[in-house]
Image (spheres, rainbow, N blue to C red):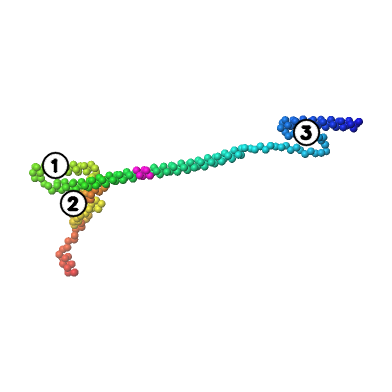
Amino acid sequence: MIDEANQHENVQSSASDASEVAGGAAEGAAIGEPTLDPTLAATPIDSDVTTPPVETVQTAVVDPEPFVVSDGGAALSEKDSEIKLLKSQLEERTNQCVRIAADFDNYRKRTQREREDLELQVKCSTINELLPVVDNFERARSHIKPQTDQETTIHKSYQSVYKQLVDCLKRIGVAPMRSEGKEFDPSLHEAVMRQPTDEHPEGTVMEELVRGYVLGDRVLRHALVKVAAAPEPVITSEEADQSGVEN
């Protein structure tokens, strides 16, 4: 009887232990903790047997942040390369525009200079055709000496035409050279005669045979001049006799 009573107590204690284990499992399931198998809870627990600890299974959570950062870094590097490419293209286009502007400015200056040179050449060519007419007027004024009133009237009439022509040439910048008494300058004068003299230093323009003209800094026609030369040495009779004796 005592053994039966002890067995009955053991069964009741096992049942109470099982109910406690089942309640703990239910409570663990409610709070998200790992639960034990009910069959294991119903099994009597031997105090001498050491049960291994129940390992809690943890769910691996993937952190998406590294992938987002990686994608963002690739996008930033791609944007940087695009910005660098756009900057290089902008710099290239800017340099191209600067070169085109410089080339156009040089072309404008060159064409303007060529146009001015062409206008000056045409002007000089036209004036050179008129200079012989001026020379004829000057020769007529120096050679013709009117004797009667009628000749004087004719002389004054064509001299008025000469004066009008000279005034027109002055207005466009033509000026005659004043060469007499100045030193011979090959850029302005053309020597057609040389006369030995002691009245003027050697190389001095003695006479202007044909007047020269300039247009600004440009020579339209060189002046034809007579230039003074060094006087020839005078040989006396004694020096001539002496040279003859030496010979």
Q: Nearer the viewer, residue 52 or 228?
A: 52
Magenta stretch, overall SS: helix
Q: Which residues are magenta?
A: 103-108
In the rendered view, does 84 fall on the left or right side of 41? left
Residue at 72% x, 37% y: name it: 56
In the rendered view, does 11 fall on the left or right side of 61? right
- Residue type pointed to by label 2: Leu
- Residue type pointed to by label 3: Pro
- Residue at the extreme left of the image, as rendered: 148
In front: label 2 or label 3:
3
- Going from N to C along the chain, the mark reached first, 2 or 1, is 1
Q: Residues within 10 Å of mark 3 (few under 14, many from 20)?
A: few
Asked whether the beta carbons under mark 2 and mark 3 sit within 8 Å of each other, the answer is no
Residue at 76% x, 34% y: name it: 36
Query: Quadrant location of residue 75?
Result: top right
Q: Is residue 80 above or below residue 189?
A: above
Question: How far apart are the alpha carbons under marks 2 and 3?
Answer: 146 Å
Question: Residue 121, image x and y in percent?
Answer: 27, 46
Say the numbered circle drawn on residue 38.
Answer: 3
Question: How far apart are the alpha carbons under marks 2 and 1?
Answer: 26 Å
- Residue type pointed to by label 1: Ser
Provide the residue designation for mark 2: 209
Say if the magenta span includes residue 106: yes
Name the secondary structure under disc 3.
Answer: helix
For residue 181, say whether it is visible: no
Provide the residue designation for mark 1: 157
